[in-house]
Structures are given as structure tokens and as C-alpha cells.
């Protein structure tokens, strides 16, 4: 499940009331916005093995800028899970098994693939078994990046206008 932030403008909505130079400056400012949003998200993204950070990309088209992360779990990192879940559709309740009596997983690095492997992991204390878990607290990186880049958009626009005025 990908997570993205997008800034999109339809220049036709201006109905010819704005000069081409101003429109070009706005589109370039939107490019700057996308670069800033991506940079800030990369600085804020939680890093364990860097899979989430590596899944990020910027897509820049005329009047449409997207910062996106492809890792399957990026939405869960951004918004949290279980009792800590935020945003629309969050359950805000403990996570419980649906089809079994308990949840079971192993610590990172342990890879049991057989019943004997699971027994070994349990003996080493690397297997975790629970009837329910609270979930994971949110670690927002996209929303703060969007807010910071959006706050800087007027500065980007002004700089792009000045750049074009000097030509």
C-alpha cells in the first residue's frame, strides 16, 4: 500500500489572467516543493534496514508533483496501528488474532521455517507469543514533510519569479 502526497494545479483555472512567466515560475516552485517534501521526508523517515527510505520517489510532471513511498508498510509507519492508529479508518483497538488463539512472531534475524526451528527460537527467547498487542505508535514522516514544504512554497515562488525577472 503506497503512501503519497501530491500538489496539483490546473493552469486553465486561471483563465489567461496570469502571464506565462508567472505560470512558469509557479510550476518551477512546485518542483522545488516536491524536492523539499522528499528531502524532509527522507530526513524524517524511520530507518531500520532503510527499505522504507529506499522505496521513496519523486514524480515531477507539469502541474502535478508527487512524493511517494512504495513499501507495503509505509501507511502503518505514518499513521500507526492498533490502539495508536490515527486518521480515517483507524480501528484504535488492540490487535488480536482472527483465525488462531495467539499471535506469534520471532525477533529480527531468527528465521524458523520448521517446527523444530520455532522450538529453537522459543528456547532462545526469540519467539514472541501474545493473545493481543497494542500496536505500533505512529512515526509520521510524510505529513511533516508536506507541512514544511507547503510553508516554504511562497518562498520558492518568489525566488522563481525573481529568477525569471532577471532574464
Image: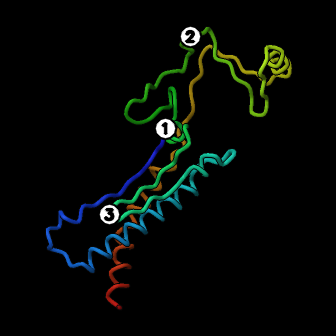
Left or right of residue 80: residue 120: right
Q: Residue furthest bottom?
A: 167
Q: How many residues crowd around disc 1 within 10 Å: few (fewer than 14), some, or many (20 or more)?
A: few
Task: In the rendered view, tell whether residue 12 sits above or below residue 41.
Answer: below
- Per the image, the residue denoted by label 3 is 63
Residue 1 numbered tag = 1
The quadrant in which the C terminus is found is bottom left
Q: How many residues crowd around disc 2 within 10 Å: few (fewer than 14), some, or many (20 or more)?
A: few
Q: Quadrant of residue 134?
A: top right
| Horizontal and vertical percent position of residue 94 | 53, 21
- Per the image, the residue denoted by label 2 is 99
| Horizontal and vertical percent position of residue 47 | 65, 48
- Residue drawn 64% across and 12% down? 102
Helix, strand or loop at label 3? It is loop
Dot 1 or dot 3: first in sequence order is 1
Q: Quadrant of residue 86?
A: top left
Q: How many residues crowd around disc 3 within 10 Å: few (fewer than 14), some, or many (20 or more)?
A: some
Q: Residue furthest front?
A: 61
Dot 2 or dot 1: first in sequence order is 1
Left or right of residue 9: residue 46: right
| Horizontal and vertical percent position of residue 117 | 82, 19
Left or right of residue 122: residue 157: left
Left or right of residue 142: residue 101: right
Helix, strand or loop at label 2? It is loop
- Residue drawn 35% across and 91% down? 166
Helix, strand or loop at label 1? It is loop
Task: In the rendered view, tell whether residue 72 sits above or below residue 103.
Answer: below
Image depth: mark 3 or mark 2 in front: 3
Amino acid at each position: 500500500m503506497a503512501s503519497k502526497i501530491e500538489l496539483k494545479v490546473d493552469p486553465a483555472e486561471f483563465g489567461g489572467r496570469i502571464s506565462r512567466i508567472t505560470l512558469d515560475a509557479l510550476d518551477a516552485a512546485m518542483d522545488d516543493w516536491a524536492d523539499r517534501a522528499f528531502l524532509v521526508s527522507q530526513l524524517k523517515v524511520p530507518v531500520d534496514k532503510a527499505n522504507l527510505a529506499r522505496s521513496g520517489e519523486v514524480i515531477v510532471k507539469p502541474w502535478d508533483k508527487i512524493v511517494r513511498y512504495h513499501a507495503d508498510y509505509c501507511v502503518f509507519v505514518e499513521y500507526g496501528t492498533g490502539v495508536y492508529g490515527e486518521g480515517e479508518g483507524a480501528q484504535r483497538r488492540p490487535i488480536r488474532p482472527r483465525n488462531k488463539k495467539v499471535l506469534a512472531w520471532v525477533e529480527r534475524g531468527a528465521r524458523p521455517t520448521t517446527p523444530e526451528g520455532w522450538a529453537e527460537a522459543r528456547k532462545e527467547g526469540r519467539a514472541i507469543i501474545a493473545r493481543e498487542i497494542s500496536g505500533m505508535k505512529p512515526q509520521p514522516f510524510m505529513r511533516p514533510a508536506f507541512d514544511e514544504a507547503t510553508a516554504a512554497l511562497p518562498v520558492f515562488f518568489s525566488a522563481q519569479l525573481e529568477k525569471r525577472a532577471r532574464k
